[in-house]
Image (spheres, coloured by chain):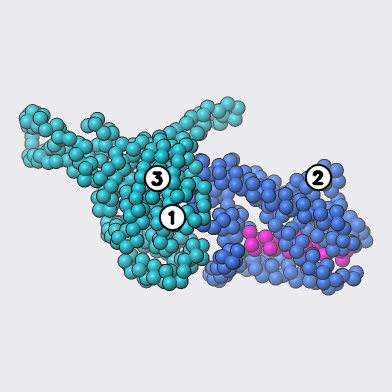
Chain colours: A cyan, B blue
Amino acid sequence: MIEVKNLSKTFTSHVKEPGLKGSIKSLFSRELVTKDALKPVNLNIEQGEIVGLIGANGAGKTTLIKILAGIVHPTAGEAKILGYTPWERANEYRRQMALIMGQKNQVWWDLPALDSFILLKEIYQIPDAQYKYNIEFLAEILMVKDQLKTQVRKLSLGERMKIELMAALLHNPKVIFLDEPTIGLDISAQKAVRGFLRQYQKEFKPMTILTSHYMEDIKELCPRIVIIKSGEFVYDGSLSDVQKMMGDEKVLSVTTQNGVFKVSVPRQDLAKKTHELFEEHYVLDLNIQDPSIEDVIESIMKNGIGAT
Amino acid sequence: MRRYLMLYLYFLRFSFSKAMEFRLDFSFRILMDILYYIVNILFFKIIFLHTPMLAGWTEEQMMIFVSCYILVDAISMTVFSSNMWWLPHHINRGELDYHLIRPVSPLFFLSLKEFSANSFLNLVIALGILIYSLVNYSQPFTVADVLLLVILILNGTLIYYCCQMLMILPVFWTQSSKGFMDLFFSMGIAMERPDRIFKGWLRVMFTILLPFALIASFPARLFIEKFHWPTFMHLTAVSIVLWMVMLFIWRKGLRAYSSASS
């Protein structure tokens, strides 16, 4: 169980005017600015559930994940994961948790993957049988069997990400935080990572929070999503229901000589808007659709709910 | 405890197999360190051409002191240096994240992960120098004396490590520890001088606040001169307090890191 109650985080920093003059001034008087990275949020996640955390850059996704992983201390609020408060960093909690950040490496670059794994086996005290089984199982579905003895820095980005995933999951964590695990990967590597995550989720049923900028990741893996905007949750519910949030909107996809553009309009204005479009543009083609999940989420991320 | 030992054995194994890959660096480091040893030994040899006694010690006594700090230097070069020099970099770039999520002490990992197999031969040479100066020592001594000397040298290495950490840890708040590290290396010379030459506030400084004199000089003195309880107690007390202060600041630093990290 993950239970988060009124969790918030405020960063304090000082502003410095540019240039040398500003630097000297800041030695004597500092103007402090505070930024609410996370306004009080609540979240409950059950065993076996995988939740997609979506938000623009700087919306507070990584901050939330780092708090739950125990790296960052929150400013206020509570969180209990498997009964532990993450930032107290109890060994019992850390042994059951995994964090994977697409932008940071945890395996040691100058070692072959297998050497890193042996260190992790010792760190997490993974029993021999479980270790062997996991290496087999993970390497098999990630298709990296031949890369395990190569120094990690000599691997491609995609292979490295797969090794990162293996390394993070060797100890069969019950709680997994995945911060943009597919960032920078090509389409086929993204697919492989997604397929792996789905299979892993099915086999081991951990609680997972996943953030990604790729809607494909979310659509394929997360039945439930949380949309975060400027540190606040603006949506927490099922992925399929998110479309209803748009209410009675239709999306007009218009093709002119200059290309394609999209307009979303309330259903009752459909006739009027279509008419206008034909008057303003030389329309080659016109398509009337329901908004896609991507459209809805993008609109919520930009405008929040109800502001469409 | 057993787990940490096993982990350390793995660190050793990885370091040695890595060192085999870069052979040039291997020989270069050994050469540099041997030069350092020669300069240090010659320095005192030359002084003793002009005087039979220095700070109360004869030449052969001085050589025991010299080999003590050479050994401390060799151990910390091999065990800690590669880790410590990268620590400010790791802290600044927010690379402690993964260390904080693992069920092992991050301090253990960050201080010991990189064993400099490159300097390992220096460790052997430094040990050889100590054995040589003991063999050539004309006064009587017992096995227990040697055992105590070795333990105190290891303790001296820990003091050296703590002093260095105290100069690195401000990086948690200041973002740069360059100035502090320069200070450390210029004050580090204090380790290479007999403690009796420090008087007044310098003595307070180097035997209590930043106890460089306790690294090699006190151990050598306890060996050369008659065992002296107050000196031994002073050494023990300062070592323990220093270690605790270092751990305290380390924890404060981690706390600062966690509140700033985003």
Q: Which residue bears the numbered disc 3?
A: A3
Q: Residue at x 32, y 52 (%)?
A: A49
How packed is label 2: few (under 14 Cα within 10 Å), some, or many (20 or more)?
A: few
Q: Residue at x 34, y 50 (%)?
A: A46
**SS state under label 1:** strand
Q: Is residue A92 above or below residue A67?
A: below
Q: Is residue B141 left or right of residue A156?
A: right
Q: Which residue bears the numbered disc 2?
A: B204
Q: Which residue bears the numbered disc 1?
A: A97
Instruction: Kindly indicate whether the residue at mark 2 contacts the one at mark 3 (C-beta within 8 angstroms).
Output: no
Give the magenta range.
B59-80
Q: Quadrant of residue A100?
A: bottom left
Give the overall secondary structure of the magenta segment.
helix
**SS state under label 2:** helix
Q: Is residue B139 left or right of residue A198?
A: right
Asked if badges 2 and 1 are on one and the same chain, I answer no
Asked if badges 3 and 1 are on one and the same chain, I answer yes
